[in-house]
Amino acid sequence: MFKTWAFVLIAAMFAASASAARDENSIQVKGSDTMVNLGQAWAEKYMEDNAGDFVAVTGGGSGTGLSSLISGTCDIAMSSRNIKEKEIALARQKGINPNEIKVGLDGLAVIVNPANPAAKLTLAQLADIFTGRVTNWKQVGGGDEKIVVLSREVNSGTHVYFKEHVLRKNDPGSKEEFAPTALMLSSSQAIADEVAGNPAAIGYYGMGYISPKQKPVAVAKDEKSEYIEPAIDNVLSGAYPISRPLFIYTNGEPDGLVKKFIDFILSKEGQEIVLKTDFVPVKK
Amino acid sequence: MRKFKESLIEKLIFICGLASVFFVALIFLFLLKEGLAVFKTIGPFKFLLGKSWYPISEPPQLGILPLILGSLLVTLGAAVISLPIGVGCAIYIAEIAPLKTKETLKAGIELLAAIPSVVLGFIGMVTLVPLVKAVFHLPTGLTALSGSIMLAFMAMPTIVSIAEDALYSVPKTYKEGALALGATHWQAIWRVMLPAASSGILAAIMLGIGRVIGETMAVMMITGNAAAMPNSILAPVRTLTATIAAEMGEAVVGSEHYFALFAVGIVLFVISFAINVTADLCLHKRQ
C-alpha cells in the first residue's frame, strides 16, 4: 500500500514539474549576482501589476545565466558583462540566437576600510595594487601596512570587467592578471564584510553595496585628472572612470511574456526601480 | 515457494550490489571522458605542475599545482589537529568514561557530524577567522589554518566513532591479562589496547582525512581562495574542491576551462581513492 502511494506521489511530482516548465504564464530569469536584487525588484513590481504572470529570478553569476540561456533552462539571462565570442558560437550551435538589451549602468566602487588613510587612487595605482606590483599601503598614500587584495570569483561579471578595464586598461593584447595572492571571495557581500573588518583590505563591488562600514575610494583616470567619487550622477555624466553597462539577453527577439516583461523594464517605471536599487538608468 | 522467495530476494540484492558498482564505473568513465579532453590543449605535466591558474584568460593558464598543494596543506593541518583530539576522545569513550557520560558524549559527537558544512563555514567565518588574524597578527584571517581547524571538526566524528569501534573490538582478555600482570589502567591502554587496535585507528584516521579532502563549502568560505603557491599554513590557499565549486557556473560547456575542471575532478578522485584504499587495507589487516 505504502509503495503505491509513494509511486503516485513521485509521479505527481514529475507531472507537476513538467507542467511548470511548459507553463506559459511563467518565465525564468537567471544570472549576474550584481543584478539579482534589481531583477527581483522588477519581478515583484511586475507581478504586482500583472496578476497571474510569474517571474522567477535567481543569481549565480553572469556566466551561469548565459550558460543557462544557451542550454535553454532560462528565458532571460542577466549579465554584467558582454557575451563572449565563444558563448555566441556555442549558442548558435544549439540553435539559440542571443539578443542583447542594455537595461542600466553600474558604477564599480573600489572600497577600503574607513580607518584606512588612503582615500584617492589613480587607475594606474589600482592596476598596480590588484596585479600585486604594489604591496604596501605606504606606496599609495596609506600607512605602513601590507595590502590585502580582494577580488570576486572568476564566474563574476564584475571580476571580468575589472580585469579588462582596470588591470588591462581596455587593451585586448594586455596580459595583466590579478595577483595570485588575491583572495577570491564568492560574493559582493563577502567582500563588504572582509573590508569592514580589515583595515588593510581593498576590494571592489557594484555601487549599490556601499555602506558606512566601507569607504569608497575616489578614482582618477590619471594623475592630472580630477578624483571622482562613485555616485549616480558621476556615472551618468561619464565622469567616474569605472562604470559598466548591465545587460539582459534573450533568445532571439523577445515575444510573449518575455517581451511584456522587458517592455516593463525599459519603461519609466522599470527604470525608476533601477535608480531605487542604486544603479543608473539607461534613459533619464 | 519459500525457496523461490529466498532465491528471488538473493538475486535482487545481488542486482543492487551490481548496480552500485556499475554506477561508480559510469561516473568514473564520464569523468575520464570529459577530463582527459583537457590534455589535447595542455600536457599532463604542465597541468599537474604548472604554477599559475588563470582559467578564463586568453589563452588559459591551467596549472593546478597551487590547488593540489592547497588541498594537501589544509588536509594535513586538519589531520594534525583532529588526530590527537579524535583518538584521545575515542580512548576516553571506550575505556575511561562511565556509562552515562559515554552515551552523552557519543550522541554529542554524532550530532557534530550532522551539522551542515555551510553552517560550520559560516560560524568559522565570523568567529575563527578574526581570531586567527588577531592571534598571529596576519593581514587576513582567511588562511589554510582557519580551514584546517574547521575541517578538523568535520573529521572528528568519523575518527572518534571508528577508532572507538576498533578499541571496543579488542578482546577483553588482553586488557584483563595486562591488569593481572600488574599494569596500571593507563599502561594497559597505552601499551596493550592501542597497539592491538592500531590498524583500526589508522583506518579511522584515513577515513577522516578522506572526508576532509572532499569537503568543499566550508573551505571555500574560510581559506581565502587565492591560487598562489602556499608558503605557510598562515597563507590563504585555494583547494581543488573549492575551485570546481566556484568556477563550474562560469565554465562554458566544451571549453578548455570546462575540461580542466573535470580533470581537477579526476585528480581529486585519484587522491580520495588512494586514501580509501589505504584505509581499507588497514581495516583488513586487523581482521
Image (cartoon, rainbow, N blue to C red):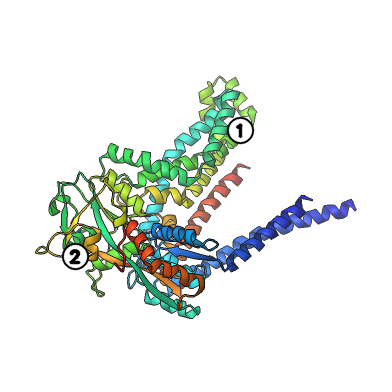
Residue appearing at x 28%, y 52% in the figure:
A210
Q: Chain of mark 1?
A: B
Residue B129 screen position, x and y as percent: 34, 42
Marks 1 and 2, how far apart at CA: 73 Å
Q: Return the residue at label 1.
A: B168
Judged left or right of residue A220, residue A74 is right
| Image location of residue B93, percent across then percent down | 55, 29
The type of residue carrying mark 1 is Tyr
Q: Which residue is mark 2?
A: A239
Q: Is residue A46 at all visible to an observer of this figure?
A: yes
Q: Is residue B51 left or right of residue B98?
A: left
Disc 2 residue type (three-letter): Ala
Label 1 SS = helix
**Residue B253 seen by the camera:** no
Vertical placement of residue B62 versus A146, above or below? below
Badge 1, how many Cα within 10 Å: few under 14, some, many 20+? some
Which quadrant is home to the C terminus of chain B? top right
Residue A269 in which image quadrant: bottom left
- Above or below, A188 against B163 in this view is below
In the image, A231 versus B2, the foreground residue is A231
**SS under mark 2:** loop
